[in-house]
Image (tube, rainbow, N blue to C red):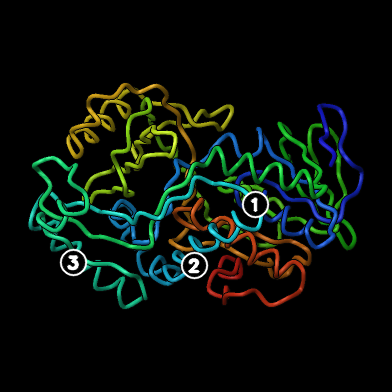
Amino acid sequence: MSTYGPDALPATIGTLVVGGGIVGSCIAGFLADEGQDVLLVDGGSGGGTVSNAGSLHVQMQSRFMRLYPEHVPNMERQLPLYPKAVAFWQALGQRLGANFDLKMGGGLMVAESREQLDFLALKAARERRLGLDVEILDRAALDAVAPYFGPAIVGAEYCANEGTLNPLVCNAAIRQWIRDRGVVLAENIMVDAIRQEGAGFAVETARGTVRAGRVVLAAAAGTRTLAAGLGAGVNIPAVAEPLHMNITEATAPMLGHLVQHADRMITLKQLGTGQIVIGGGWPARRDDQTGHARVELSSLIANATLAQHIVPRVGDLRIIRTWAGLNTSVDGMGVLGAVPGVPGLFVAIPGDAGYTLGPLSAQLVADVILGRAPGEDISLFSPARFV
């Protein structure tokens, strides 16, 4: 293993992966497992700047459906990958011999009115046709499995395939894995430009130029600028969404499910350490100079207020930390695979709920890079649709 500090980068490398989040890190690890030499470059600390809040999503998120109704058909096309992605997380933990604090208690999307419950019933019918294990629970059935909701809740959609994990634990384990496999880590280094050079690429950074035989763009929304800079007609409309999150002090076991809402922005889940993570899409702001997400006081207040409205016992807990991360939205589907017309260039953007889809998406792209058929048909998700 080599970690390059502030002054040195390798002059040449077989594969350079841009982006050290869950997708880029896993691609680097899967390639290194196959004997490839890999350099992983990240503008911050790998897996630490925009890490997920710990949800393993499977059912369609109502927030996405409201914000991007034109993209719902694409999301439905990718939906069968979600339960497979959760199973892949379980297999990855076993493969690495790591405890990801992964719990499969199922997910509950709650409703506060008959109208919202009817919306969930229609959504569940669509999801069942696509192979998901979902059902509608009235309040009596909900109380039998989750007796912690406030009086405003009238029912919920239950998805058996959903769960939670601890992303900080996951990121640390994956980081150790790729270090052990010899992946070269270059952190706090921004990639300024990429250009084709001979049969490979010249990747320009503030700390020098690296020549790579292959380049993988796993930089989430940053992929858009890097791909467009190649001048090959590649226009990937990836957009960054700064989102706010809170975490409480530890408490006794309270929430056994991933909790969402049919019409409002909220996620609630309890880590194995006892803390409750409160997220769900309240906006943060993005710093124009650094590109990093910054917290918003109004989102902190609104997010916490809604959490205790849904689960009143949350109101007894102190919030010990808030942070902001960046979600990436494209067109309702991921962007996975080789870029037509640019040999050796690959894109890896997993789609909505990117942390859930991350490791599986990484394996599929790694398979393409290695010249073998991926385990799933990813032709729908090809970058070709934007060329």
Q: In this picture, is 299 found above or below 354?
A: above
The percent position of residue 359, horizontal first and vertical second, equals 59, 57
Look at the numbered discs 2 and 3 and tell me whether their residues touch, using CB distance below 8 Å: no
The mark lying in front, picked from 2 and 1, is 1
Quadrant of the image occupied by residue 54: top left
In the picture of the structure, the residue carrying the numbered disc 1 is 97
Estimate the spatial distance between the alpha carbons at disc 2 and disc 3, rounded to whole Å. Answer: 23 Å
Quadrant of the snapshot with the N terminus: top right
Tell me the SS state at disc 2: helix
Q: In this picture, is 374 found above or below 273?
A: below
The residue depicted at 56 percent of the width and 39 percent of the height is 169
The percent position of residue 292, horizontal first and vertical second, equals 54, 31
Dot 1 surroundings within 10 Å: few (below 14), some, or many (20 or more)? few
The residue depicted at 30 percent of the width and 58 percent of the height is 65
Q: Earlier in the sequence, mark 2 or mark 1?
A: 2
The percent position of residue 268, horizontal first and vertical second, equals 32, 41
Q: Earlier in the sequence, mark 2 or mark 3?
A: 2
Estimate the spatial distance between the alpha carbons at disc 3 and disc 1, rounded to whole Å. Answer: 39 Å
User: Observer-nearest residue: 44 or 375?
Assistant: 375
Tell me which amino acid carries mark 2.
Answer: Lys
Tell me the SS state at disc 3: helix
Q: Which mark is residue 121?
A: 3
Q: Which mark is residue 84?
A: 2
Tell me which amino acid carries mark 1.
Answer: Gly
The percent position of residue 13, horizontal first and vertical second, equals 87, 51
Q: In this picture, is 252 found above or below 72?
A: above
Dot 3 surroundings within 10 Å: few (below 14), some, or many (20 or more)? some
Tell me which amino acid carries mark 3.
Answer: Ala
